[in-house]
Amino acid sequence: MFDVILKNGTIYDGFGGTAYIGDVAIEGEKIASIGNFDQDQAKEVIDVQGLAVSPGFIDMHTHSDFTLLANSKAESQVHQGVTTEVIGQCGFSSAPVCCAEDAKIMSIGYVDNAVDISWNSFGEYLQKLESTPLGVNVAAFVGHGTIFKTVMKEKSGSLPDDSQVIAMADLLDKCFQEGAIGMSSGLEYYPGRMTSPEHLVPLCEVVAKYDGLYATHVRNRDQHYDLGFMEALSTARVSGVRLQISHIQPKFGAPDYAMKHTLEMISKAREHGVDVGFDIIPHDWNHTSIKQILPSWALDGGTEALRERLKDEECRERIKSNRTPMWKIVLADKWDKIALLYSKDNPDLVGLNFIEISKIRGVPPYDCALDLLLEEKDMDSLLWTSQSFSEEDLVLCLKQQECGVISDTLALAPYGILKNHIGSLSGYGWAARFIQIYVHQLKVLTLNEAVRRLTYLPAQQLHLQGRGIIRPGAFADIVVFDPQDIRSNCSIEEPRKYASGIAHVMVNGHLSFKNGQRIDVNKGKVLRRATL
């Protein structure tokens, strides 16, 4: 007898082929059979007629390293059908670290007094994750920035010498032995922007040794987009690593042809044997920490040194005169297209653009941003968002069969210690929005192809065996949804609203979401490299 039968559903198996009507039988944590079964063949039968039965969505690019420890239920993800997410992206991971203070600095989404930081090594961090009931499966990348900071210590503002690069490679090797499945870099961020290809190649060779994936937030996606993407391709070519270019869409300041040219560069690299994948965030807003707009010299010495520089009129003018900020939209003074996304100390301003904030405060927009940074107790948590991506670029990318879809956000919950937290405008609805906009509204993809982009494609890239598909023997990570009614309810005014249209979610054969309601069942696993 089976444990559960999902009966009469329209099965989208993840491979991208034609959907078909059938029953999915689950036994234990795996799919036992697909066919037509009688009601008395299972302990529980759920009629899903008229609904899509899909592999659980896989989010291969998140920053939930810390928030999954603060609230392991991953509510914002489960409520939209996500069953697996991959943490440790853009060069940031919560381990390995030398001390708790470094873990705080390198943990995007850090919250004071939420978690006892008792780990140093990557393995100890994964054990910490395993000690809590997880709402989703979790696989982990190592952040290059975290490796860099751990080895360089107080010299993290300097370039590494040969011995330090070797030490980084050795530390990364240990992380893979302890369960990492990849390495990420954030070359627009500090300390990632302190490195260069000759420092990255030895680390990527370690990743290649374990057949892991190297995911990179490239150095530049605006004026010099071609240099940034070519650096990634060159690093992969020389090291032999499998490459994933994260959130590939060029930013404000890039020429109109940048996306097309980038895809041409990738095609040419593939002709020469480079294994390249890429992905997009399914909206045209670009979010990051306000702190990242600052030049590297302003960040040297830590938070208190930065506060003194922001108070100093001469230093502030030097910061504002920086000709190479992370966002060219700032240089163009497009402050009406930049909005405050998260602030603990100025919550009344969240959702307003910087023209509106400027009028309220009576100071220029750039100074408003620096003032807000100065006023925020936890500078790293101060977020803004800008309309820096092109919808045309997104559509062009999605027309490429190898283009994945990611959230680039955090697993959150609108209650408890994370209730005021935010990661992006679409954090609570990115997967639902992808189907809502690009399948139903713009008709860029069919639903079966959209499901493949969210399931089998990322599972292939990540080498997640038995996940991202519906077939006998696969893990029963399943989402059942209304194919016409699935939608995001997020907005800049209300970014913490759950998605609609999800009926049921199963993680490793256990229902965690039933009849549109969350069940307090959390059976996710840590997917270490050796257990994939």
Image (cartoon, rainbow, N blue to C red):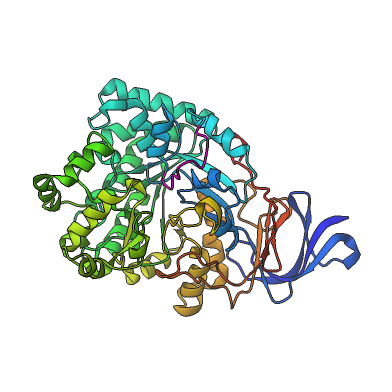
Q: Position of residue 477 (x, y in %)?
A: 66, 55
Task: Write the start and end of the magenta stretch as one range.
Answer: 108-117
Using the image, determine if residue 348 lies above or below residue 235.
Answer: below
Name the residue nearer the viewer: 31 or 419.
Answer: 419
Name the residue nearer the viewer: 532 or 144.
Answer: 144
Residue at figure coordinates x 26%, y 69% from the top left: 337
Using the image, determine if residue 384 lies above or below residue 107.
Answer: below
Name the residue nearer the viewer: 123 or 68.
Answer: 68
Q: Is residue 55 left or right of residue 252?
A: right
Considering the whole magenta stretch, tell me its main secondary structure: loop
Q: Is residue 462 magenta?
A: no
Residue 196 visible to an observer of this rendering:
no
Residue at figure coordinates x 22%, y 41% from the top left: 306
Residue at figure coordinates x 25%, y 24% from the top left: 161
Image quadrant occupied by the N terminus:
bottom right
Looking at the image, the residue that sits furthest to the left is: 314
Q: Position of residue 21 (x, y in %)?
A: 72, 72
Tally of numbered tags:
0
Q: Is residue 198 left or right of residue 58?
A: left
Q: Is residue 476 left or right of residue 197?
A: right
Q: Position of residue 529 (x, y in %)?
A: 56, 36
Q: Position of residue 523 (x, y in %)?
A: 68, 48
